[in-house]
Image (tube, rainbow, N blue to C red):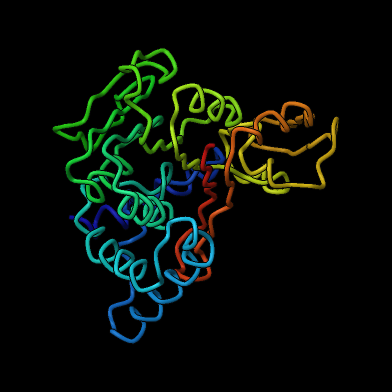
């Protein structure tokens, strides 16, 4: 049956869709393709662990061996993920970074804003089995994985009333395509310690994502951006631009103890690159 469907797609469906500017791909997660010989697996794990350790090993106060251990755990576990997707959401590399950080920090509370199909919720639960997880999105219609213990809230996280001091040691993961400087300010107001931003692109990579968070946390690392600097790019929705606000950038940086652009991991693993930024608040 699958072979017949593949032939029909190739002969009939693909030509018709291409005439309209579309392509149809099977919903298969990228991690179904993977090295299976031990030498190649070991090389992938070592290279990924080295890149992560160089970026945030000192911040997380762990050595390379601990990070490699967590990288291997994720590599061995991800094939059991129930979320099937070809595009959208975090891929292998984004999931790997999120897993390693959450596993090492062991937060008691996790806030996830932007859930989509539920892949990163699954990753966070794998990393922190006993954590209290809040999941925020404007709709959960696309969910393929729903965590039995998580709290699902269909609204923006900033409109939810947490208990006073509840988020003091929480980890926040933002993949919601909202102004990331605003998210830093909101997190600071709620005494949150650590944030991971997905789709946090530096200015020269703004064209890489359809739905963007502007300004991104990554902008805060770019010394070349001056007040009024105009960033322009062409996306699927046409020409876009943003003018850098240096005064606001200074205020937002003042809330941050450390900002780190995490490695894309594409060269290390072969999977599609991720663009994540770590922010530790004061």
Picture coordinates of residue 63 (x, y %)? Answer: 40, 69
Left or right of 143: which side holds 238? Answer: right
Residue 203 against residue 71 in the figure, above or below:
above
Picture coordinates of residue 42 (x, y %)? Answer: 34, 80
> Residue at position x 64%, y 44% from top?
218
Q: In front: 55, or 7?
A: 55
> Residue at position x 42%, y 38% from top?
173
Task: Count all numbered tags in the image, as a single digit.
Answer: 0
> Residue at position x 40%, y 29% from top?
113
Picture coordinates of residue 252 (x, y %)? Answer: 65, 31
Q: Quarter of the image containing the C terminus?
A: top right
Q: In front: 13, or 183?
A: 183
Q: Quarter of the image containing the N terminus?
A: bottom left
Picture coordinates of residue 248 (x, y %)? Answer: 72, 26
Residue 29 against residue 228 in the figure, above or below:
below
Q: In front: 198, or 172?
A: 172
Q: Residue furthest left?
A: 148
């Amino acid at each position: 049956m699958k072979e017949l469907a593949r032939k029909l797609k190739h002969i009939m469906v693909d030509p018709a869709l291409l005439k309209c500017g579309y392509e149809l791909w099977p919903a298969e997660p990228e991690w179904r393709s993977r090295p299976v010989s031990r030498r190649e697996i070991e090389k992938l794990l070592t290279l990924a662990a080295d890149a992560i350790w160089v970026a945030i090993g000192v911040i997380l106060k762990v050595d390379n061996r601990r990070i490699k251990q967590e990288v291997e755990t994720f590599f061995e576990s991800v094939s059991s993920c129930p979320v099937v997707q070809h595009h959208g959401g975090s891929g292998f590399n984004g999931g790997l970074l999120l897993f390693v950080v959450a596993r090492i920090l062991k937060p008691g509370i996790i806030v996830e804003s932007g859930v989509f199909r539920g892949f990163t919720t699954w990753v966070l639960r794998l990393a922190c089995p006993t954590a209290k997880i809040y999941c925020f999105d404007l709709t959960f219609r696309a969910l393929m994985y729903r965590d039995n213990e998580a709290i699902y809230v269909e609204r923006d996280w900033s409109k939810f009333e947490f208990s006073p001091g509840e988020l003091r040691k929480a980890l926040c993961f933002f993949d919601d395509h909202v102004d990331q400087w605003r998210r830093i300010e909101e997190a600071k107001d709620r005494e949150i310690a650590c944030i991971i931003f997905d789709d946090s692109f530096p200015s020269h990579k703004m064209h890489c994502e359809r739905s963007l968070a502007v300004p991104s946390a990554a902008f805060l690392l770019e010394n070349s951006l001056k007040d009024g600097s105009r960033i322009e790019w062409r996306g699927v929705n046409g020409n876009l631009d943003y003018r850098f606000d240096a005064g606001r950038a200074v205020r937002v940086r003042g809330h941050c103890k450390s900002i780190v652009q995490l490695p894309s991991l594409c060269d290390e693993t072969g999977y599609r690159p991720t663009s994540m930024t770590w922010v530790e608040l004061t």
